Image (spheres, grey):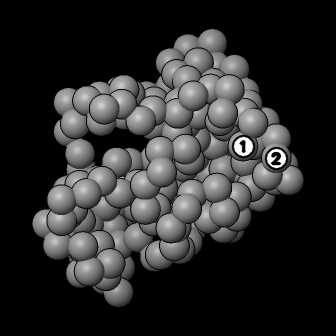
Amino acid sequence: MKAGPNSYRFTEILESSDFPYELLENRIPIRSAAEGAAYWGIELGATAPALVLWAQGRFLLLIVSGAVRKVDFGALALETGENGMRMATSGEIREQFGLKPGEVPLFGLGLPTLVDRRLLACDFVYGGSGDPGKTLKIAPEALLVLNEGSRMIDVPCLAEETGKGERACEAG
């Protein structure tokens, strides 16, 4: 059963949310946080990749700062109490939501959502809209409201982009 976002419903939710946003058209596909930052001329940390995860027999959404180069899924599982956490496969995402990785929207999938606290340092974040030709620019606080069952977390990482190159994240 596909539960992907309907573009009309997505826009309707945005318009009724009272959060400032823009749906920006990108002329080329954006396949990574680095490509998005370069395309829009923004800091890498203002990109907000939406990752579908699988843990304990259910899907979760993780919205992480693009500055996080490698999520520490073991530490994230311990922090959230979600055992066996892993990235969902391309096939699982396509079958369950009718989307390809890279098309996952920042909200609208009806999944429990984990939002990276780093994103709150930005006035706006840029991420998926469910349409590969459009990028959603929105206030990061909206991610907590528009995703039911969401919570803010400090996403543990193995490597982080500082703007001066990649460095290992400091252990908590």
Give left or right: position of 90 versus 67. left
Q: Position of residue 53 (x, y in %)?
A: 29, 53
Would residue 7 be found to the left or right of residue 52 on screen? right
Q: Nearer the viewer, residue 63 or 148?
A: 148
Above/below status of 105 relative to 29: below
Q: Which residue is mark 1?
A: 13
**Is there a contact, CB below 8 Å, between mark 1 and mark 2?**
yes
Marks 1 and 2, how far apart in space? 5 Å
In this view, the residue in front, 72 or 7, is: 7
Question: In x, y percent, where is residue 31?
Answer: 43, 28
Q: Residue at x 59, y 18 (%)?
A: 133
Q: Residue at x 73, y 48 (%)?
A: 138
Quadrant in the rendering for residue 69? bottom left
Q: Which residue is mark 2?
A: 16
* Picture layout, residue 58 above or below residue 131: below
Q: Secondary structure at mark 1?
A: helix
Instruction: Name the residue located 65 percent from the left edge and 35 percent from the top edge.
Output: 10
Image: 2 above or below 43 = above
Is 116 on the left or on the right of 167, as rendered?
A: right
Looking at the picture, which amino acid does disc 1 mark? Ile
- In x, y percent, where is residue 35? 50, 31
> How busy is the neighbourhood of tag 2: few (under 14 within 10 Å), some, or many (20 plus)?
few
